[in-house]
Image (cartoon, rainbow, N blue to C red):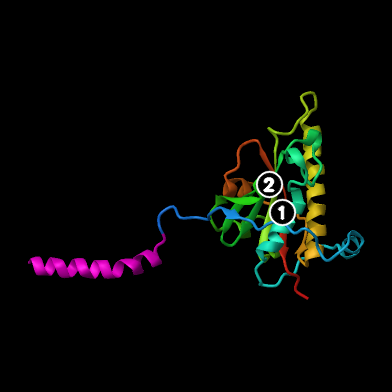
Amino acid sequence: MERTHARWIRRIAMSLPIILLAFPAFGAGPQDIALPKRPASVQSDLVSALEKRKSVRDYRSEKLGTQDLSAILWAANGVNRDYGRRTAPAAFGNDYLEIYVVSDEGAWRYDAMAHRLTAAAPAGLKERLTSQRFVGRASHVLVLVADSGKIPGLFAGSEDRLRWAHATAGAIAQNVYLMGTARGVGTCLVAGIDEGAIRKGLNLSNTAIPLYVMPLGYEEK
């Protein structure tokens, strides 16, 4: 009887690695990502980037490189001055716009101060961001979210504060377009989003307002 038990224990131990590979650990999800340092320069001047700026909806299957993603996120709303000042303007200099990065592997929030991505949600959200199918075919998708609790204006109405958020999002979007053009990455500003899916998928607070999504990918020509 003891020998029989020993054989069963050995069989279970030998099969354990296969079981673990087939069934990932409970609660496993995306990990935080340290982005490479943003580029000091790009091989394009501002006029050339403006001349070539366009919306791209056809993307190759190739995944976006981390250097390109780092450059685009920093350009979008990264820190460019002392005291945490950003590349995009915001009312009273407040940081009320959050950028999420969604891919086939999961979702992350861009931490501009540390220039890194912090894990926000598991895989499965990218195809549910919008009904526009080309977005789901992109390598990565940026989701622009305003936190109404951080939008300043004690004596301003909610409509005014929301307009400020949209204005900041527009500046961020143009930054993404220009750096994307300079780095050979296509994008498109999409307003037709599934707000409910984004709220649920990213587990957003009640004060968070999804505004736009921007797919990122190398253009299919």
Percent coordinates x, y for residue 10 in the rendering: 21, 69
State the CA–CA distance, disc 1 to disc 2: 8 Å
- Relative to 116, say whether 208 is above or below: above
Look at the image and say whether residue 22 sits in the magenta stretch. yes
Q: Nearer the viewer, residue 53 or 34?
A: 34
Quick check: 62 left or right of 45?
left
> Which residue shows up at 92% across the image and 61% down it?
47
Look at the image and say whether residue 221 sits in the magenta stretch. no
Q: Nearer the viewer, residue 45 or 94?
A: 45
Q: Nearer the viewer, residue 51 or 213?
A: 51
Residue 39 visible here:
yes
Residue at image mark 2: 112
Mark closer to the chain start, 1 or 2: 1
- Relative to 218, say whether 103 is above or below: above
Percent coordinates x, y for residue 190 in the rendering: 76, 55
Q: Which residues are magenta?
A: 1-24
What is the residue that sits farthest to the bottom in this orientation?
A: 221
- Relative to 188, say whether 96 is above or below: above
Which amino acid type corresponds to the residue marked 2 in the rendered image?
Answer: Ala
Disc assigned to residue 73: 1
